Image (cartoon, helix red, strand yellow):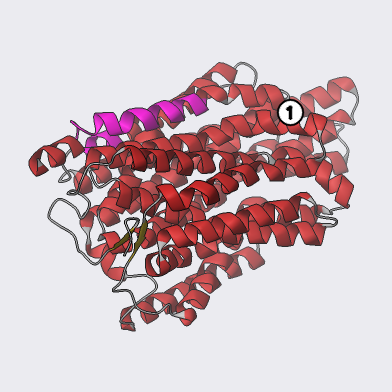
């Protein structure tokens, strides 16, 4: 075994399995820099696709269905394989899997950039999802192994999270600059240099970790996990997009049925793909629940905020992106401050207080009107993102820190899968609620004289109302658009209010279930 290799077989201690261990040095922090840069560029690579979609669809002749698959297939494959890849990394080595994934991500990025048709691009995006599923669990597991000191681990996760979240702000700006000077495929090449750096410096800076006690990978469990996750994610996305129809509901139910079969199989295996015994750890289960609930309630509001900026306030895409910057700054601030405060304050108090701040931000959004609510929405969304910082950073730290080192990859994969489910569930449930309120309000508010076809489009969505109003005579179109904006704002208000109440309830539950976890500084002091 060389200096870069370690094997993990240990279990948890009373303070957590990662509460003891040597402090990280320069090599570990340099390795974190490589991992964080890769996270930043991969995040940018994901967000710039939103800007490139119109141009690439025109150049490749992609229809509406093909455009949806171009957007969604990456997330489907990513969500479906996170647990499998996290477990695989624990078995074959996290650095090895990370480097394999980096090579695959770079190759798939080039394939996507030079796609000659929609089918080729969809296939390339699917391969990107497969490769992307190796990156996050391997990265977070390596961070958990490299930074055994609780204070250092929290800071390292915070830095990684900040870089990933910064892609949401930098992505549209970089993407706009690339699309102004180059062809649409250039946006897919952003991740290639990062993967090259990871392949070049990863073997030098990143140590290898694997669980020598792990058994063989159960392929039947892999198939069952895919059969459970993929239909469920697809169904939730379709429910948000098309409403309560037979196909998405059937997909969700099928995913749930396969999920039950998957869980039953795991109980009977000596070396399960998903070790259900991890849920016996109170900190692990509570942190996973808090993260998923917070993502469901705070993440979904972004759907309404982005539509409010562009369709209600009438901002251009660039100005809407600029209006989102306070929220991005809030996310970064919350993520950076959380590990520092967690040295002296119990994580439960920080996560609970952050959720309370998020609820206050959601209530501020309910004060925005259809004509003069831009400031309230921007500030409310920023406050919600500040409050989400402790939840994102500290729950990840708790999940990684609550399991034996040999299960870190699996824990990271479960955490990311829960986040994907939470976001999809929030969009489906809260998005459907907002849409229902919109339709109920607009049904009796359409002005007389609006043609039936235009009225039907307006009843469907706010975007449809905007298109219909542009084809009507000036005063009539203005009245229709005003009614639609009022209806959408009403839906946003109710959704934000319900989310705020549920988020406060989640904060109370988090305080109750995680109050036994000590501040990271006290854990380190006890170790010293």
Is 333 within the magenta?
yes
Q: Nearer the viewer, residue 468 or 52?
A: 52
Q: Which residue is mark 1?
A: 177
For label 1, the SS is helix
Left or right: 255, with 486 as reference point: left
Residue 227 lies, in percent from the top left, at 54, 73
Q: Position of residue 526 (x, y in %)?
A: 8, 41
Camera sees residue 450: yes
In the depicted structure, whether residue 177 falls above or below residue 18: above
The answer to whether one can see residue 443 in this image is no
Q: Is residue 157 left or right of residue 282?
A: right
168 lies left or right of 57 = left
Chief secondary structure of the magenta portion:
helix
Tell me which segment is drawn in magenta: 327-353
In this view, the residue in front, 374 or 456, is 374
* Residue beneath the point at 19% across and 48% down: 19
Q: Residues within 10 Å of mark 1 (few under 14, many from 20)?
A: few
Q: Position of residue 219 (x, y in %)?
A: 48, 80
Residue that appears at 38% across and 75% down: 263
């Amino acid at each position: 075994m060389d200096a870069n290799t370690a094997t993990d077989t240990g279990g948890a201690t009373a303070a957590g399995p990662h509460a003891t261990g040597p402090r990280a040095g320069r090599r570990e922090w340099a390795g974190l820099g490589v991992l964080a840069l890769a996270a930043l560029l991969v995040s940018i690579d994901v967000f710039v696709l939103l800007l490139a979609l119109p141009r690439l669809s025109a150049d490749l002749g992609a229809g509406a269905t093909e455009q949806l698959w171009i957007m969604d297939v990456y997330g489907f494959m990513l969500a479906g394989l996170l647990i499998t890849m996290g477990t695989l990394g624990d078995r074959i080595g996290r650095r090895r899997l990370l480097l394999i994934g980096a090579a695959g991500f770079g190759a798939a990025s080039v394939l996507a950039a030079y796609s000659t048709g929609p089918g080729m691009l969809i296939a390339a995006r699917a391969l990107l999802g497969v490769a992307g599923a190796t990156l996050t669990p391997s990265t977070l597991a390596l961070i958990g192994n490299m930074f055994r000191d609780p204070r250092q681990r929290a800071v390292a996760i915070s830095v990684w999270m900040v870089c990933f979240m910064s892609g949401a702000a930098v992505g549209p700006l970089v993407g706009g600059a690339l699309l102004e000077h180059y062809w649409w495929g250039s946006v897919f090449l952003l991740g290639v240099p990062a993967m090259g750096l990871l392949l070049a410096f990863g073997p030098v800076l990143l140590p290898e970790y694997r669980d020598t006690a792990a058994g063989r990978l159960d392929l039947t469990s892999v198939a069952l996990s895919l059969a459970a996750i993929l239909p469920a994610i697809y169904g939730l996305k379709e429910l948000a997009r098309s409403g309560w129809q037979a196909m998405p509901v059937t997909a969700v139910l099928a995913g749930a049925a396969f999920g039950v079969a998957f869980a039953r199989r795991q109980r009977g295996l000596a070396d399960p793909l998903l070790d259900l015994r991890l849920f016996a750890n109170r900190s692990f289960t509570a942190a996973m629940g808090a993260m998923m609930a917070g993502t469901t309630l705070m993440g979904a509001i972004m759907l309404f905020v982005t539509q409010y900026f562009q369709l209600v306030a009438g901002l251009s895409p660039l100005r809407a992106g600029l209006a989102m910057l306070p929220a991005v700054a809030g996310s970064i601030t919350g993520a950076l401050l959380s590990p520092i405060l967690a040295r002296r304050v119990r994580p439960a108090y920080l996560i609970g207080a952050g959720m309370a701040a998020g609820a206050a931000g959601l209530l501020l959004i309910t004060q925005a009107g259809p004509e003069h609510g831009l400031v309230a929405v921007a500030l409310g969304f920023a406050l919600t993102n500040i409050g989400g910082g402790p939840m994102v950073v500290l729950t990840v730290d708790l999940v990684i820190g609550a399991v034996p080192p040999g299960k870190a990859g699996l824990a990271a994969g479960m955490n990311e899968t829960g986040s994907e489910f939470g976001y999809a569930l929030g969009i489906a449930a809260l998005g459907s609620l907002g849409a229902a309120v919109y339709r109920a309000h607009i049904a009796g508010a359409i002005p007389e004289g609006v043609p039936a076809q235009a009225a039907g489009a307006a009843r469907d969505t706010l975007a449809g109302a905007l298109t219909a109003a542009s084809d009507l005579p000036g005063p009539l179109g203005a009245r229709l658009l005003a009614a639609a904006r009022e209806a959408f704002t009403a839906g946003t208000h109710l959704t934000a209010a319900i989310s705020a109440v549920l988020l406060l309830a989640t904060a109370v539950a988090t305080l109750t279930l995680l109050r036994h976890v000590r501040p990271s500084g006290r854990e380190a002091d006890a170790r010293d």
